[in-house]
Each structure stands twice: as structure tokens, then as C-alpha cells.
Amino acid sequence: MLAKLRISKLVSSSLPRRIYERRFLVTHNAFSNSEESPESPELPSWIKDFLSNKPSSSNPISDDEDFVIPSLASWVETQKLGREEASPGNVAKKPIEYIDKVSDFLNKKEASHEDIVKELTGCDVVVSESLVLQVLRRFSNGWNQAYGFFTWAKSQTGYKHSSHAYNVMVDVLGKCRNFDLMWALVDEMKSESSELVTLDTMSKVMRRLAKSGKYSEAVDAFLEMERKYDVGTDTNAMNSLMDALVKENSIEHAHEVFLKLFDTVKPDSRTFNILIHGFCKARRFDDARTMMDLMKVSGFGLDVVTYTSFVEGYCREGDFRKVNEILEEMQEKGVKPNVVTYTIVMHSLGKARQVAEALGVYEKMKDDGCVPDAKFYSSLIHILSKTGRFKDAVEIFEDMTKQGVSRDVLVYNTMISSAVHHSRDEMALRLLKRMEEEEEELCSPNVETYAPLLKMCCQKKKIKLLGVLLHHMVRNDVSIDVATYILLIRGLCMSGKVEVACLFFEEAMRKGMVPRDSTCKMLVEELEKKGMGEAKLKIQSLVQSKVMTKSQSPLPVA
């Protein structure tokens, strides 16, 4: 009730911004002691200790200390003691000693996956499925290391890959666009057991092909999977293919599949909703209406998912008159909007800076008896933060659990990004700490959690903290992707830390992640400005070597 009252006050308030008098005094609150005074130049020791997992030190840490990327750093060894002494409730479920040993082997040097298999013969660990899955998470953006370990693990006595482990490896290879090896692994699964290749396997294959723009190959994978892998091409399978195509912006291919299979694979309501969503996403509303008519003729009722696709499409257009017409049509047809519908409308109104109208969506939700969820709160926090009402966003964040809505990683990510946006750096780090204290597994940090924190470090030249955060990512099995490397390289170049930017560029290239041309150009230009001719030649040589092998490389260029 308290949270509902506060949100209602936000809607009805006549002031442009309310000033809350409440003070957050509870020790576990992420926002305590950070609202009334500016950030201190040196971050508190508890933050350094938490992030680095080592005992407190009275010696000040300079932001300009020599920087070494965590995967190559010798100082990582000094932090193992802290990890081994971690509380049982926090990380006891993870085979920490084994994951560290494996990571040490995989990070030793650049090598082919065949060489990695040979190197791992000296790795004294007991292989389990939990260890395999953790390694694949930690190296999900480095197929060479992941596949090398996966191959070696398969040969270990007493261990056999499950279908789930195979599927995760298939997904890693597809994510890294090594499609030849991905298909070879699927064939290996078939040869191992006829039951290993499932619809889940082929859905991952089709989605990764579609995400890479290989739409025809995704369709071919579907058409061949029954003959080659005994995976049935039923309605669920067709929906999986069409959903992948629509999400990756090819409604044309999805529609072709629908027409081609209409007489052989019976569509269901989800089939039609996927196509309607795709047409609305492509702003082809007349085609979406035609599909609605066909859906009704085929005996399926129009539901909230159907109408929400139109709501989302018109919201993207910024045509709120049409949005209201759809909502009125829903009311006439007796179809109630759900929390997804309301969240889309509120977020779009907020993005259009129609804040009063956006907050008014909550009142409409209450009238309809619709209960907010975590995504709704995340959107509300984002709107309040972007419009300068950060303290209000803090209130909403703190009160949401009193309404029985658990915070998830999206809510935390939104709050961390908001804190960084409002220069509450210490607050953002406290939130990262608080995520680990949450009991819910839904609050495990991901790459989006760290992005605003890393950007903040680059902008403010907090190089030591940057290194510690990167190590914290590794400890949480968060794999650095090409977008994060680009963020780091560009951010460090703009902050004058070109030497550190070079380290990240070389690390990205070593892992086969090729930054886009504009990022390479920026780095080369900054090196030229600083008169670092030797480093410039080295970067240009790396770029040239990748250009020459680009047509052969399976890895993404972003």
C-alpha cells in the first residue's frame, strides 16, 4: 500500500519535483551516506576491499598505477585467499579452486583449441557438469578457450557431457559465429546418441544463424533437422524458427516459412502472434491487420499478446493517438491489457518526455487491477532518473519489495546506470555489492551491470578501480564481449589513457574480437597525437593481419 501511495503522489504532485525528507539509515541500504555530500576523491576502503576481495590496506591507491588486464595479471594470484575465505552462503556452490585452476591454464597464452587440449593435460581438476557450465559461462565470448576445455573435459574418466552442456557449447560457437565447428559439434552429438540433439539444440542453432543475418541457412536448418537429426518439424519447432527470424528483423523470411508450411504444419495462436509482432515491428500495420483477420478465420481469438504488438508498434512511431485507439479497441473486445502492455506505454511516454502521462499509466493499472512487476518498476525508475527525479527513483527502488515484487538484475542494472548518470559513483558500487547480498539468483550481475561502471572509470581515469571491476566480472563468470572492449578502448582514448586502450585492443584481437573500423581509427589517431610511433605500427599490423584473414574468420566484427 505504501508504494502505491507514493507512486500516486508522484502522479498527482503539482511540483516539478518533490523533495523527500526521509533518510535511509538502515545499514544494508545502498544509498545511505551518499545523498547529502559530494563524492570523495578517494573511494572508501570497504568498496576496494569488496571488489578486490582482499584485506583492507591503509596505503592509498593511485589511479595511475601500472595497469594489467586481469586475464594476464599476476596480481590475480594474490586475491585467491580472499575468495577461498568467502562465506558459504555466497559462493560455496561454485567449485572455486577448480575454476581458478582451469582459468589459469586457459589464460596462459594464445593457442589453438587443439593446443589448449594438450596444455590441459597438466590441469589437475575433477571434471563435473557444474564446472563445465561455469567455464563455458566465463569464456562464452572466447570460443577457442571454451571449446578447448570442452573437448578436454569429454576425455576425462568418469565424466560425460549432458545434452544441456552440449547445447551451451553449441550456443557459444554460434554466438562467436564459428558455424562450421558448431555444425560439427551437432553432428558429434548425433553420433554420440540419437537423444542428444533436441529442439532446444536446433533452436539455438537457428537463432544464432538468424542473429548473424543467415536467414536462409536458419530456414534450411529447420527443413533438414528431421531428416538429419530426428528432430520433428512440428508447430513448436516452426514457431521457434519464426520467432528467431522476427526477433532478428526478417519478417519476410518468417512470412515465407508460414506460407510454405501452412498446409503441412498446423499454425496455432502463437504462430499468428509472432507474425503480427513482426509486421508491427517493421511498421507494416496493414499486413499485421491482414494477419489478424486470418487468425480469426483460422479459429483463434485475438488476445492481449495480439493487441500489445500493435501498442508497441505505434509506441515506436510515437503515435499515441493510435495507441489510445488500440487500448479502446481492447476494451470493446473485452481484452484487458496486462503489465507488459502498460510497461510499454509508460516507457514510451517517458521516452517522449511526457512524464505526467507516463506516471498516469500506473493509475490506469490500478483501476484495471493489474499488478506491476520488476520490468515495470525498472521502467519507472528509468523515467524518473532521466527526468531529474533521482530521489524519487530511489524511493521506488527501496519500496518495491514491500509490494511483494522482487528486484531482479534488470532493476539493479537500471538503478546502477541511474546512479552513475547522476554522478553517485559510490552509490553505484554499493548497489553492485548489494546484488551479491540478495538471495535471489535473478540478481547475478551480467555484462550490462558493469558497462556504466566501466564507462565511469574510463571517463574519470580511475584505472585501478577499472582493473578491480574487470576482475570482479571474471569472479562472477561474466565474459567480456566485443561491445565492452569497444566501450573500454574508446572511453580510454577519450580520457587520454591511450596506453591502457592499447592493452584492451590487443586483448580483444587476441581473443578474435575485431573492433569496428572507427574504433581502430580512433586508437591509431590518438597514438599518432602522442608520438607513440612503435605502438601505432603494432596496432596497424594487428588490424592488417585481421583484414587479410577476415573472410576466413568466424568471429564477429562489431
Image (tube, rainbow, N blue to C red):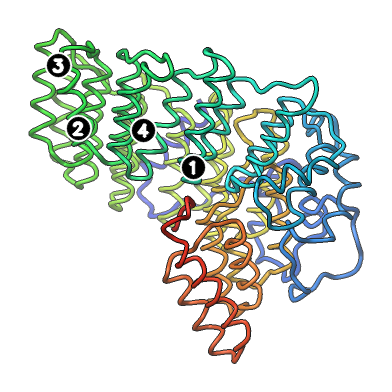
Residue farthest toward the top in the current orientation of the protein: 299
User: Around disc 1, counting alpha carbons within 10 Å, would you say few (fewer than 14), some (14 to 19), or many (20 or more)?
Assistant: many
Badge 3 marks a residue whose secondary structure is helix
Q: Where is residue 132 in the image (x, y as percent from the top left)?
A: 70, 31
Write down the quadrant of residue 167 in the picture. top right
Would you name the residue on which mark 2 appears?
310
For discs 4 and 1, the disc positioned in front in the rendered view? 1
Instruction: Say what amino acid the circle numbered 4 marks.
Output: Tyr
On residue 175, the disc is: 1
Per the model, the C-alpha gap separating discs 4 and 2 is 20 Å
The first of marks 3 and 2 along the sequence is 3
Q: Is 87 left or right of 198, judged from the image as shown? A: right
> Which amino acid type is shown beneath numbered disc 3?
Met
Give neighbour class at mark 4: few <14, some 14-19, many 20+ (Cα, 10 Å): many
Marks counted in the figure total 4
Q: Nearer the viewer, mark 4 or mark 3?
A: 3
- Is 397 left, or right, of 367 in this rendering? right
Q: Where is residue 1 in the image (x, y as percent from the top left)?
A: 50, 25
Where is residue 458? Give x, y as percent.
Answer: 60, 68
- Rate crowding at label 2 as few (under 14), some (14 to 19) or many (20 or more) other CA atoms within 10 Å: many
Q: Which residue is drawn at 49% across and 32% down?
A: 374
Chain-order first, disc 1 or disc 3: 1
Horizontal side, residue 118 vs residue 424: left or right? right
Identify the residue at image location x=13%, y=40%.
321
Q: Which label's residue is closer to the chain start, 4 or 1?
A: 1
- Seen at 49% across and 52% down, the residue is 555
Q: Mark 4 points at which residue?
A: 362
Per the rendering, the mark at residue 295 is 3
Q: Which circle, 1 or 2, is nearer the viewer?
A: 1
Labels 3 and 2 touching (C-beta < 8 A): no
Whole-angstrom CA distance, mark 3 to mark 2, is 15 Å
